[in-house]
Image (cartoon, helix red, strand yellow):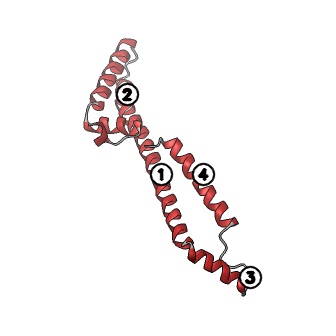
């Protein structure tokens, strides 16, 4: 499968190509009336251009949704990591502050315990899901 950045570049190029095609070659009417319109419509019908163009637009929309889904998963994963890492550390430091303890030993013990808690959280289903989403896969692919 494509990487997220490569897929995003592909979607952007596809959208540019569609815009160029539409502005250059796809005209519904050349004039208000006359044989030019009849020829254009006959050509479009002969080559099934309206149906093909609709298919191309649908494919571009599918790619765009795929890119948005991947980006959303990466953002969710990053937020999950911040939560998994930040919650134990913040809790440990908050407890030390409330207790008014400023000793370096207690700070190091609190940080060690928070790292252990973070490691424990990362071994849970939620932790594996967070790590998996950061790697760009789904949790089911990793199991």
The answer to whether 137 is drawn above or below residue 60 in the figure is above
Residue at 32% in and 39% down = 129
Quickly name the residue at label 4.
Answer: 13
Within-10-Å neighbours for mark 3: few <14, some 14–19, many 20+ = few
What number is the disc on residue 68?
Answer: 1
Q: Which mark is residue 117?
A: none
User: Can you identify the residue that label 3 sits on?
Assistant: 31
- The residue carrying pointer 4 sits among few (fewer than 14), some (14 to 19) or many (20 or more) residues within 10 Å by Cα, namely few
Q: Regarding mark 2 in the picture, which secondary structure is present there? A: helix
**Disc 4 or disc 3, which is closer to the eye?**
3
For label 4, the SS is: helix
Query: Camera-side residue: 123 or 14?
Result: 14
Of labels 1 and 2, the one closer to you: 1
- Residue 78: % across, % down: 43, 38
| Residue 104 quadrant | top left
Q: CA distance from mark 4 to mark 2?
A: 44 Å
Identify the mark nearer the N-term, 3 or 2.
3
According to the picture, the residue beneath numbered tag 2 turns out to be 89
Question: Which numbered disc flags the more N-terminal residue, 4 or 2?
Answer: 4
């Amino acid at each position: 499968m494509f990487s997220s950045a490569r897929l995003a570049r592909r979607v952007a190029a596809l959208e540019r190509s569609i815009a160029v095609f539409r502005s250059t070659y796809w005209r519904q009417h050349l004039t208000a009336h006359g044989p030019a319109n009849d020829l254009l419509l006959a050509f479009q019908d002969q080559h099934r251009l309206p149906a093909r163009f609709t298919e191309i637009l649908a494919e571009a929309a599918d790619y765009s949704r795929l890119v948005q889904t991947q980006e959303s998963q990466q953002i969710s994963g990053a937020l999950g990591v911040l939560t998994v890492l930040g919650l134990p550390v913040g809790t440990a430091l908050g407890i030390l502050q409330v207790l008014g303890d400023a000793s370096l030993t207690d700070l190091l013990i609190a940080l060690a315990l928070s790292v252990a808690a973070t490691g424990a959280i990362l071994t849970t289903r939620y932790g594996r899901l967070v790590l998996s989403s950061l790697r760009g896969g789904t949790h089911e692919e990793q199991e």
